[in-house]
Amino acid sequence: MGVTLFKEVNYTLSKLIDSIEMGEIGLPEIQRPFVWPNAKVRDLFDSMYRGFPVGYLLFWSNGTGGGHKQIGANTKQKIPSLLIVDGQQRLTSLYAVLKGIQVVRENYRRENIYIAFSPLSEKFEVTDASIRKDPEYIPDISMVWSETTDMFELAEEYLNKLKLTREVSSDEAKAIKKAINNLDNIQNYPFTALEISSAANEEQVADIFVRVNSRGTPLNQADFILTLMSVHWDEGRADLEEFCRDARQPALSSASPFNYLIQPDPDQLIRVDMGVGFDRARLQHAYSVLRGKDMETGEFSIERRDTQFSVLREAQAKVLDLQNWQDFLKALRVAGYLSQNMITSNVAILYAYVFFLIGKHRYNVDHFTLRNIIARWFFTITLVGRYTGSFESYMEQDLARFRDVSDSVGFVTTLEHIIQDTLTEDFWKITLPNDLATSSPRSPSLFAFYASQNLLHANVLLSKLTIPELLDPAIKAKKSATERHHLFPRGYLTSQGISDLKDINQIANYALVEWDDNIEISDQAPKDYFPKYAKRYSEVELKQMMFWHALPQGWDNMDYFKFLEERRKLIAQIIREGFNRLG
């Protein structure tokens, strides 16, 4: 047997709570937002009350604990010597209820967890309006462990309220007092924790987690980094949380990160932090750096850790700067991407933001040039799916290209070289038309087509309104302003013996039309409906419309599969035309 990487340690609940309160055990709220429903918290207390097991805890020795925090405000007395790997939701539940504090929900709003207890039936419930009115229940068990609570007075107060509604026998009174005392004794509930040695690296910790707890949410490097931020830099964690919350809520007056393209999560913004601060895309390396680990010797250093967190702090200030954020998002809109519905990869947005910040702060690229090159860059990486699959590897390679770049011209030139090497003649004429041969409703090439139509200020098919006007995400109605219309309607194709949805729902068979027109066309053959709508336009207008929507001449009388083949080529040309507008 090799070296044992863990030891078993026993705790009582009160000891765990005290250790969290003192800061010896790190309980990071934002490692993951609190996702347990209150009913699960209720069941946890019920199991503990009845003496049932509730599972192991898994801690990881920090390796640099014992001192005082060097970065940010220190509301606790010590740096945690133990980080929670498994059991965060349980400990968050217990700590929040016993201390009567709020938790952070998935929407980043804070709220208390209210659990009720009936001493007579020894039953736990999630507190609601009816429970609060029911004298059989203590509506909030947090009061049992409050420092200001006298257990004798609590029991007497409960009995007095109950006696106002019915007779209470002496046996019932005795049982009630006993149940309240048993509830208080939950703080003596025994827990067993596996404490992983600080010698274990993050991959080993993640592997241990999977082996001992197959039911938990898989860990990733971002979880570890967010844990460390909670331990060593509370304000940084809180700033991330606030930014992500505000990005989901429109602001009426003040500046806000809210937008229609991405609602980032803290772990996603950590990727941007690392790219800007450390030129790193692989979070596993960044994690080791932030632990203060020397990559050569493997030793930990508090001084090195504090230095690296200082770098992180400077990077995050740039990442969360609202002017930076909104200026960057303008570049995406310049690229023709208007809403989240057109985005197939949030990673592409995050990594484009990395390059935007590097260009602005490291190379001092002027505002106009930076917006244009980032628009071209985002269009390119989204169209080709550059950051899908092994996206960290591609980003590491891209970041490495800038190691010898010293000025703004070099920055722009380097990005342009990657763009030109990617969007070759073969790509436009062979690869892209082939990519369009799909029925996927969320194809990057389909959304690049829409983005290009936005850039060309194209009208919606058969309409005088423009596509940008009708794709505006700020406009909400019961019915979508535009519909993805089958140019060869499904009912018509079925009548012609074409019933496979993979054939019917080809990208090349779709066009954006107004909702009313889509309903009116219904299942008519193209040769029947298109000539009638074409009469709305002059010859010049009709030619322009067919160009915008990549419609081959005489398409309405074409063989369906020949139409698909020809239209794919024309769609590829429109995408290229749109991209060239960003030149």
Image: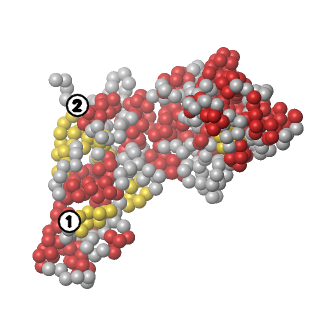
SS state under label 2: loop
Q: Residue at x 30, y 40 (%)?
A: 215
**To which quarter of the image does residue 346 belong?**
top right
**Dot 1, crowdedness within 10 Å: few (<14), some or many (≥20)?**
some
What amino acid is found at the position of numbered circle 2 in the picture? Leu
Q: Residue at x 19, y 70 (%)?
A: 120
Quadrant in which the N terminus is drawn: top left
> Can you identify the residue that label 1 sits on?
122
What amino acid is found at the position of numbered circle 1 in the picture? Glu
Between residue 373 and residue 485, name the one nearer to us. Answer: 485
SS state under label 1: loop
Q: Is residue 142 visible?
A: no
**Dot 2, crowdedness within 10 Å: few (<14), some or many (≥20)?**
some
Q: Which mark is residue 112?
A: none
Residue 362 is situated, as x and y percent measured from the top left of the image, at 60, 31
Of badges 1 and 2, nearer the viewer stands 1
Q: Residue at x 52, y 28 (%)?
A: 388
Q: Residue at x 64, y 52 (%)?
A: 479
Between residue 544 and residue 30, name the one nearer to us. Answer: 544
In this picture, residue 37 sits left or right of residue 499: left
> Can you identify the residue that label 2 sits on?
5
Total residue callouts = 2
Quadrant in which the C terminus is drawn: top right
The earlier-in-sequence mark between 1 and 2 is: 2
Residue 256 is situated, as x and y percent measured from the top left of the image, at 60, 51
Residue 574 is situated, as x and y percent measured from the top left of the image, at 73, 28
Between residue 5 and residue 97, name the one nearer to us. Answer: 97
What colour scheme has been applied to the protein in the rendered image? secondary structure
Q: CA distance from mark 1 to mark 2?
A: 41 Å
Q: Is residue 492 above or below residue 153?
A: above
